[in-house]
Amino acid sequence: MNRASLLELLKHPQRTTALSPNGWTEFIATARNANLLGKVAQRLHEAGVAVPAAPLRHLEGARLLSERQHHSVAWEAQCIDATLAQTDEPVVLLKGAAYVLGRKAAGVGRLFGDVDVLVPPGSLGKIEIRLMAGGWTQMKSEEYDQRYYREWMHELPPMIHVRRGTVIDVHHTILPLTARSHPDADAIIAHSIPLPGYRSLRIPCDEDLIIHSMCHLAHEGELHNALRDLDDINSLLSEHADSPDFWGQLGDRAEHHDLAASVALCLMLVRQFFDTPVPESLVLRLAGADATAIRRLTRLYDVAIVPDPEGRPPLRSLAAQLLIYIRSHWLRMPPRLLVQHLSRKAWQRLTLASGTSPKNKQGA
């Protein structure tokens, strides 16, 4: 099943009634490999589509898993809130957890593995201590990984709860400190919205929520979740389709966060993949003098994002994915630091492969 067919069925789930048994098999496998099976299952369920028994088992499994994860993230949020409320610091949920607890359409049927939070940089020490006292522990013990996160990255090393096995990523901004763009994390926190029923938890305002999702897509080098992320963005934008002031506000926030080009790229992509009615004037405003380069980059993403039922994209797509991976690292670090980092990680992988590494087997 090609991408166009998958997107068509994602947007119009009732059209799955025309699928043959082989068509259902390809549809399920392609959606699973794109990490969209939970969303597909939920949309088919809500549309009341009669699904044959064999694919229904896979769809119901994904839908129930999504519901279970959403209950789990609500419980995890309660635990995080109870642990961090005593710090008197705002704790802003990001991405999947924010979609689910903020009751956003992007969260419906979405599958995710961890909880991301954003806190003021000056509070990192006490936040980390409180989490450790609450049962979370570091997942990265290797000295270089600790330095990598604490000196250069936008987050602490990931932490896992010793009993529940849940993972939390504590961010102090939304891009690495070494990145070429410098979003205003203080402004994200200042404009965030308290979550009812919680003492410390908040979610970003709608514009910042969308911009962070776009930022993640535009700066992330691995594209296995790219189609899901574009669907997230499309769902978030669609909630504001009838708001005449929204697009201008989105543009203002993108420029404020030094992410105009990244937002322009994602607006072009979501319009191309989902026919989202994005104003051309906003795209041109944000792209500015880089409009031609961003359009070329859009074509590269178009080649790279090709879901496949067997997870085997064509060579052309693999080449495009490699170029995007290289670009993402170029955006994250200056050249000298990038060469040092990649050389170090390559050496780690070699020593792990030879069985000589004495320590942590999880790289940054």
Image (cartoon, rainbow, N blue to C red):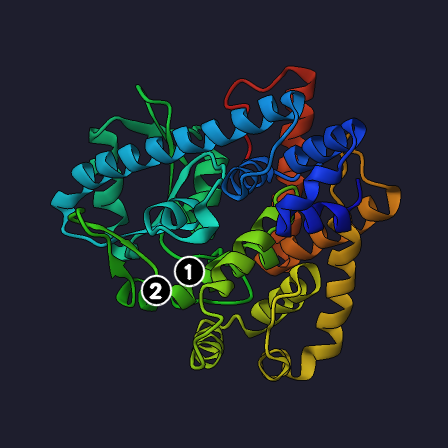
Name which residue lies at 61% across and 64% down.
266
Indicate whether 274 appears above or below 304. Answer: below
Quick one: 97 or 321, which is closer to the camera?
97
- The label on residue 263 is none
Name which residue lies at 68% across and 84% down.
289
Query: Quick check: 42 left or right of 307?
Result: left
- The quarter of the picture where residue 147 lies is top left
The secondary element bearing badge 1 is classed as: helix
Q: Look at the numbered discs 2 and 1 and tell me whether their residues touch, using CB distance below 8 Å.
A: yes
Q: Using the rendered image of the protein, determine whether residue 39 is visible from the camera's viewpoint.
A: yes
Query: Quick check: 360 left or right of 192?
Result: right
Report which residue position mark 2 lands on: 205
Name which residue lies at 72% across and 54% down.
324
Amino acid carrying label 2: it is Cys
Q: Quadrant location of the N terminus?
A: top right
- The label on residue 209 is 1
- The quarter of the picture where residue 355 lies is top right
Indicate whether 185 appears above or below 170. Answer: below
Name which residue lies at 32% across and 22% down.
164
Q: Position of residue 11 (x, y in %)?
A: 63, 52
